[in-house]
Image: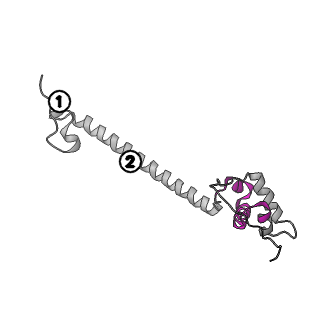
Amino acid sequence: MSDDYQRIEVITGTARRRRWTSEQKLRIIEETYEPGESVSAVARRHGVAANLVFRWRRLMDEGGSIAVSSDETVVGNSEVRKLEDRVRDLERLLGRKTMEVEILKDALDRAESKNGPCDCCRSGRTVRCEADRGDVGRVALQPA
């Protein structure tokens, strides 16, 4: 037999996921851009999966150090503009609907003041005017 030994690493237990600080991520990314360095070699040296380093590099290219530190996806300017336009359209629609509600309330108030209260409102026998909702058979108050 040969005296050559291979190094075998046995991982036991339930280790928690490691968290990398922004500074650590940026330092690792910067190392990958140095001449003669490969992403795989830098990743092995720091004990990081190469695909994770590639992901950090992509986030860095797309959104800079802020995206790398927050570990969130970056949204392009065109997408932001599209969403801002959608918000603006919805705000306009909300304004129109609010104005319509105010106009209808004003018209209802004018119609009631012009015609005066109806018979059921004048008598005080119902909790709410039957004419308000157009249904008959509302709850009547019992005379005391």
The image quadrant that residue 62 belongs to is bottom right
Q: Residue at x 43, y 50 (%)?
A: 96
Q: Is residue 6 left or right of residue 14?
A: right
Residue 143 location, x and y as percent? Answer: 11, 25
Say what amino acid the circle numbered 2 marks. Answer: Glu
Q: In the rendered structure, which segment of residues is drawn in magenta?
A: 44-72
Query: Would residue 104 be counted in the magenta stretch?
Result: no
Distance from the alpha carbon under mark 2 to that under mark 1: 30 Å
The image quadrant that residue 43 belongs to is bottom right
Q: Residue at x 66, y 56 (%)?
A: 71
Residue farthest right in this picture: 35
Query: Would residue 46 be counted in the magenta stretch?
Result: yes
Residue farthest top in this picture: 144
Q: Residue at x 38, y 42 (%)?
A: 102
124 is higher (above) or lower (below) than 32: above
Q: Which residue is mark 2?
A: 100
The image quadrant that residue 72 belongs to is bottom right
89 is higher (above) or lower (below) than 3: above
Q: Residue at x 17, y 30 (%)?
A: 122
Helix, strand or loop for disc 1: helix
Residue 121 location, x and y as percent? Answer: 18, 32
85 is higher (above) or lower (below) than 120: below
Secondary structure mostly seen in magenta is helix
Residue farthest left in this picture: 143
Q: Nearer the viewer, residue 56 or 14?
A: 14
Report the disc number at residue 122.
1
Query: Within 10 Å of the Cα at label 1, are there few (<14), some (14-19), or many (20+) other Cα atoms?
Result: few
Residue 46 location, x and y as percent? Answer: 78, 60
N-terminal of the pair, mark 2 or mark 1, is: 2
Helix, strand or loop for disc 2: helix
Say what amino acid the circle numbered 1 marks. Answer: Arg
